[in-house]
Amino acid sequence: MITKPKGTYDLLGIDAKIYTYINHEIENFMANYNYDLIRTPIFEASELYHRSVGESSDIVTKETYDFVDRGNRCMTLRPEGTAGVVRSVVENKMYGNKNDCIKLYYNGTMYRYERPQSGRNREFTQFGVEVFNSNDPIIDAEVISLGYNLLNSLGIENVTVAINSLGDKETRHNYTEALVKYLEPHINSLCDDCQRRYKSNPLRILDCKVDKDSEILKNVPKLSDYLSKASSERFTKLKMLLANLDIDYEINDKIVRGLDYYDENVWEYVTTDDGITLGGGGRYNFLVENLGGPNLPAVGFALGIERIILNLKNKIDIDNLNNNIDVYIMSVNEEEKMQAIILAQNLRLNNVITEINSNNLSLKSQFKIADNLKAKFLVILNSDDLNKGLINVKDNATKEEIKIDESEIVDWILGNI
Ligand code: HAM
């Protein structure tokens, strides 16, 4: 037997139903917020990720799926969505209309060669939004609240937004200097990753999972003490906006994010009961320029769909997601079956959820299936009635049966479901 690759999964059963429900909710949400869908390729030139996600990030150093194509080009399966969207914004010159924000969302498969565990796969799905051309914290607040409200409306209410400010370039420069100086005498007692990050990206030492409880990391200088006036004001405005929008947030100065393109405000959506990070994002005001575009400020986030499915599995009313159907059409002989599929098509084209008997099942078995599917009405075809132009309908709740003229059956059902 050939089995699926490590870190991948087949989406099926109840997970598939929850996934469909999430996508449905996402489409409604994004229409209300007036964001446009964007779909970018699943693989891009490897250079894109080196120049955006960053040479010092774990994603680029340890986790990308790289391959050389038949034309000898270095390609990478996308580990995240932001870089591809920015590439597309630049390539398609979407920034033509200088006055408007460009508000985009995407929903697709990403690839990271990580150690698989619950909620961490090698192939996974992200829903993300990216907004370009506004540097105002009001857009940070819109984007943060969009993610928070979406999680809430999906049924995940035990979530908080952990926010932090990485400050502007000057802030990060000054803070990194102070951090390196503080860590210098201690660095050999920190983990291998910290020692590597000390040289490549010292800020990332702040979110080390191995040494997080060590006295050394507990006493690091505070990034918030180094914020420039402008960054500090920006962060204060964001907090005020989030409070006015009733968003449950908390300040967490250890959030530095694992991708190199961030600056200023960053955040993560974290569940309050089990501390799972469902998503994260932040500002990335220099990425468009770094990838050859104009100076275009931007902000966005992504949610991990698999983690949302895992969370919802324990709380969602699965019964509501099951295919409860409107009409089950019962048939036994060939003539009845022929009528069944024609009537089913008519009903389905009128938005009536309809199922038919597609095997040689006994009437008893068909009654059972109709009950399992929670059919509201049973259409019980029989040749005698059909010859008289009549159709037998049973209300599955009241058990009342009536005969309807064949030409009126669709209207009758539409009027009664
Ligand atoms: P990220 O924090 O790397 O950010 O990923 C966002 C979310 O994707 C995570 O919080 C998690 O829920 C999910 N995720 C990441 N890796 C895995 C995995 N191996 N298995 C399952 N789920 C995973 C980004 O990717 C940024 N592009 C977000 C962003 C958009 N920033 C600005 N715009």
Image (tube, rainbow, N blue to C red):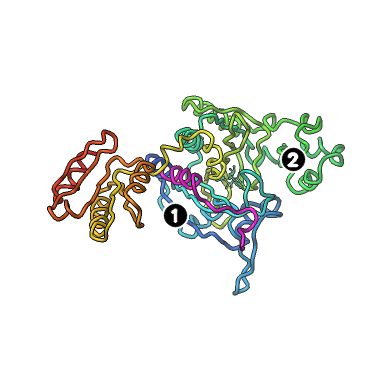
**Is residue 393 toward the left or the right of residue 18 in the image?**
left
Image mark for residue 94: 1
Q: Quadrant of the N terminus?
A: bottom right
**Amino acid type, residue under disc 1 in the picture:** Met
Residue drawn where x is 29% and y is 45% of the image? 327
Q: Is residue 354 visible from the viewing direction of this image?
A: yes
- Provide the secondary structure element on which disc 1 rests: loop
Callout 1 touching callout 2 (CB < 8 Å): no
Residue at mark 2: 205
Tell me the CA gap for discs 1 and 2: 36 Å
* First to last magenta residue range: 1-24
Mark 1 vs mark 2, foreground winner is 2
Beta carbon at label 1 within 8 Å of ligand 1: no
> For residue 23, which quarter of the picture?
top left
Q: Is residue 142 visible from the viewing direction of this image?
A: no
**Amino acid type, residue under disc 2 in the picture:** Ile
Q: Quadrant of the C terminus?
A: top left
Residue drawn where x is 61% and y is 41% of the image? 263
